[in-house]
Image: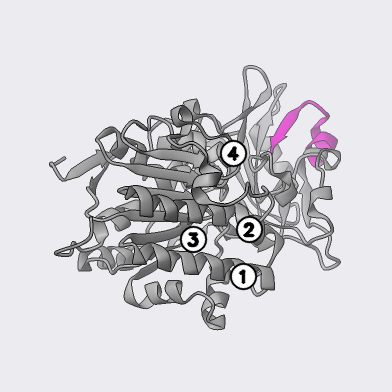
Amino acid sequence: MTADNLSVNGTDYRWPEHPVVVVCIDGGDLAYIEHGVAAGIIPNIERYMTEGFYTVAHGTMPSFTCPNNMSIATGSPASVHGISGNFYLDRATNEPVVMTGPELLNVNSVMSEFSRRGARVVSVTAKDKLRRQLQKGMDLSNGSVSFSSQYADRCTMEENGIEDALDFVGQPQPDVYSAELSLFVLDAGLRLLEERRPDILYLSLTDFIQHAYAPGHPEADRFYAEMDARFGRFEALGATVALTADHGMNDKTNEDGTPCVVWLQDILDAEFGQGSSTVICPITDAFVGHHGALGGFVRVYCHEGLAGERVIDAVREVPGLERVLSRADVAREFDLPVGPEGDVAVLGDVRTVIGAREVDHDLSGLKGQRLRTHGSVHEADVPIFLSRPVSDEYARRAEDARPHSYQALDYAFNGVARRCGAIS
């Protein structure tokens, strides 16, 4: 590490000479970008593709929100930071454990480490479950701020580094199932950039729109146009804008519009008996209205002498199931921590989601809409955009091998060429 660099989780990051704004577009499937460019509604992102930097990266598997935000923010794979879903099964108690507590994050985020060296950082998330983990180790004593739009009405100086966040942003408390929950995050970032001039801003959105509306729907178009306009405003304030996503999104329905689901726990109970295994759906969180706790990746924990090999043999030919992997194989292939893994990991195809028992999933939150969700490898491709071009070295690096999304901060901090007279 030099005086101008800070080493975090194995990567040296150059100290920003002007603010770096990193936006994680939750559910930011490439299809929305393709449509937005064709429709002419995202001119700033379109300009980044030609005048800045653009590549398609490998996201972290499973393609869920928490593992990917932690990968992006820590600059490391899940095997390092330890978060591989929202839930896992504690084998000692046979009880599901929520994986969103800061104590389960093995390393601090890049923002937290910079704050501990005197940088002023901002972390604003749509959902508070992310805020708590991203804030681990963060020093708020130097004007840094960390809060969620979900609980913007509860901010305190001690916990968040800001009070009266609603009054500061000048907006009412947004509903958790709304586009405004995400737009509030961006507007808060803009106001903080204007007022406090932080060095680093990490802004993480929510995927309500992408779960509810396919590319080309008027509501999706409005949302992407609103985001794009704000990205331009960040640039106008002198920031480098870095955009990426935690995962994509796909339609998971049958021809008749009903969800295309494999009820895996029901299958295993019929084959091996109730209590012989536990299926954990790691997409499960407090926002089941988005997805009904259905995703393209689940874990099977075996009990009472049931071997994982028997589970693999029993389900590998089930229609809709694309991959059935052992604990060791899934951890090795997707660079995951072995500890939380089940004995078997099951992945759906592009159209299929996997549930536990049918009676345990409440799909009323879909309100008759088509099920759109994520979790499989088919939602793991994500974009990286930079508002400024990168050096020849970083351009060649992206051409030689597809980056991982956890390298987004490396490209944003180290890839963008330094400029004389840059705003700081």
Q: Which of pointers 4 and 3 lies earlier in the amino acid sequence? A: 4
| Circle nearer the viewer, 2 or 3 | 2
* Tag in front: 4 or 1: 4
- Which residue is labeled 2 in the image? 179
Is tag 1's residue or tag 2's residue first in the polypeptide sequence?
2
Side of 173 where 124 appears, left or right: left
- For the residue marked with disc 1, what is the amino acid? Arg
Tell me the residue at 79%/26% (across/down). 275
Tell which tag, 4 or 2, sits nearer the viewer. 4
Label pair 4/1, CB-CB below 8 angstroms = no
Q: Amino acid at mark 4?
A: Asp
Identify the residue position indicated by label 3 in the image. Answer: 382
Going by the numbered disc 3, the residue's amino acid type is Val
Mark sitting earlier along the chain (4/1) = 4
Q: Secondary structure at mark 1?
A: helix
Marks 2 and 3, the one that precedes in the sequence: 2
Q: Position of residue 75 (x, y in %)?
A: 36, 45
Label 2 near label 1: C-beta < 8 Å?
yes
Q: Element under label 2?
A: loop
Question: Is residue 273 shown in magenta?
Answer: yes
Mark 2–mark 3 Cα distance, whole angstroms, equals 20 Å
Work out how far the residue at label 4 is from the one at label 3, CA to CA, in angstroms.
32 Å
Which residue lies under the disc numbered 4?
A: 153
Sequence order check, earlier mark of 4 and 2: 4
* Residue 77 at least partly seen: yes
- The magenta span reads 267-280
Q: Is 253 drawn above or below residue 120 in the view shown?
A: below
Tell whether position 192 is magenta.
no
* Total labels drawn: 4
